[in-house]
Image: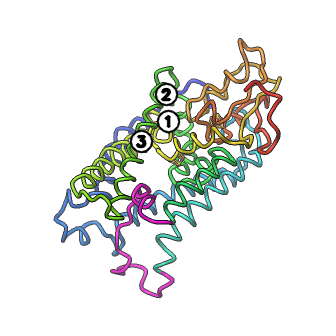
Amino acid sequence: MPETLTRGDNEKIFLWFFFPIIIILYLVYKFPTLFVPVEQVRDTFYFFGKSTSFWYASVYTAIVCYFSLLVIIRGTNPYSLVKRPISTYQRAKFSSIFLSQLIVFYLIPFIIPALQEGREFFNDPYHAVNKDAYVYVYNGFTSVSGLIYIFVIVPVLAWLVGKRYCSWFCACGNLSESVGISKWGQQWVRNYTPRSKTALQLEWLQFAILIFVLVYGLVLFLDLWQIFASATLTTAMYSFQVFAIDFMFGAIIGIGAYPLFGTRIWCRYGCPLAQLMKLFGKFTLSQARIKANSDCRGIGECSKVCPMGIDVKSFAHINKKPITGIYGLSQTPCISCGSCISACPTQALEFKTIFSKKGDNNE
Ligand code: SF4
Ligand code: SF4
């Protein structure tokens, strides 16, 4: 792959169609009544009696599984400019992506219940109900399992292994990781991930979204217990979340703008869960970090492939002189995807052993 990459004609054609298609499909999936009256939604958009969310999840899962399986089968390092075998870490990561997407985010919610109850798979009125993909605020604050997931399981994971949740398991991250290793995806990450000083400063936006989510969650929680009930406020906050955060930010910018800003815009600027993990990660005792050794030659491939826009090379060398820098969640929003490690031609970066003792570093 050439180092300086320009968009080819096919990609340009794809791009001109990409945005409108994403917007239209997402609108059909999320707001079908914008197009047809409610009583016609099923006849118009439910192919073979399956909901728009079923088809959305099917296409999404097919893309994730295709690219992740491909990289496992090919066995070549997807981040390196020179041909090298894929590392054990990357093989395990893409296996986890493949399995979690297929089983947790597709078979369990969409396929198994329909089969289990012995009804017809297609044209089954019981399972033709749309599932909302962005419900974690509502579920997180109105159910015990949601509360445990968001406020216990995810923070404990972040505390133990950093943000590997984001690169090994999360449904949004699964798409980012798998599209990010496709031919065009690699160009989008390398060429268009925002890396300027302003881009880094703008990451505060994610904190603002976390505050909104916590306030909205508190309102939902109080409403549930009938301590405080205001239909107007909950409706207004719900509408803001659905339109501004889920639709505009999560879908249109977060996925639709992969070709313009790389594959992790939502994860860097939008996702409140990531901000929560970062907060917990700051207090971690584990050593979920990456460390540079003295082999660095100042090539800077690491920074080019980082989908989170982290200046990895600044932890590995100064003026091309190697330094033994270490970084983790305290300093960066690193998701431990390992791209920087795999891209380095001199193997100057490595994961620190998670439960090793602190020390030997410049933290
Ligand atoms: S930042 Fe949020 S959306 Fe992105 S992978 Fe992590 S948890 Fe998922
Ligand atoms: S610093 Fe390396 S491991 Fe962390 S997000 Fe960037 S590329 Fe992935």
Which residue ends up furthest to the front in the rendered image? Answer: 227
Numbered disc 3: secondary structure: helix
- Which residue lies at the image location 67% right of the left edge and 23% below the top edge? 313
Q: Give the residue type that dot 1 points to.
A: Gly
* Amino acid of disc 2: Pro
Q: Mark 2 highlights which residue? A: 194
Extreme-left residue of the structure? 37
- Residue 98, quarter of picture: bottom right
Task: Give the quarter of the figure containing the C terminus.
Answer: top right
Q: Earlier in the sequence, mark 3 or mark 1?
A: 3
The segment highlighted magenta reads 115-144
Q: Quadrant of residue 301?
A: top right
Q: Real-space Cα distance between discs 3 and 1?
A: 25 Å
Does the magenta-highlighted stretch encompass residue 335? no
Residue tagged by mark 1?
Answer: 262
* Distance between the alpha carbons at the discs numbered 2 and 1: 8 Å
> Judging from the image, what secondary structure is the residue with disc 1 in?
loop
Which of 202/278 is in front? 278
Q: Is residue 307 above or below residue 195?
A: below
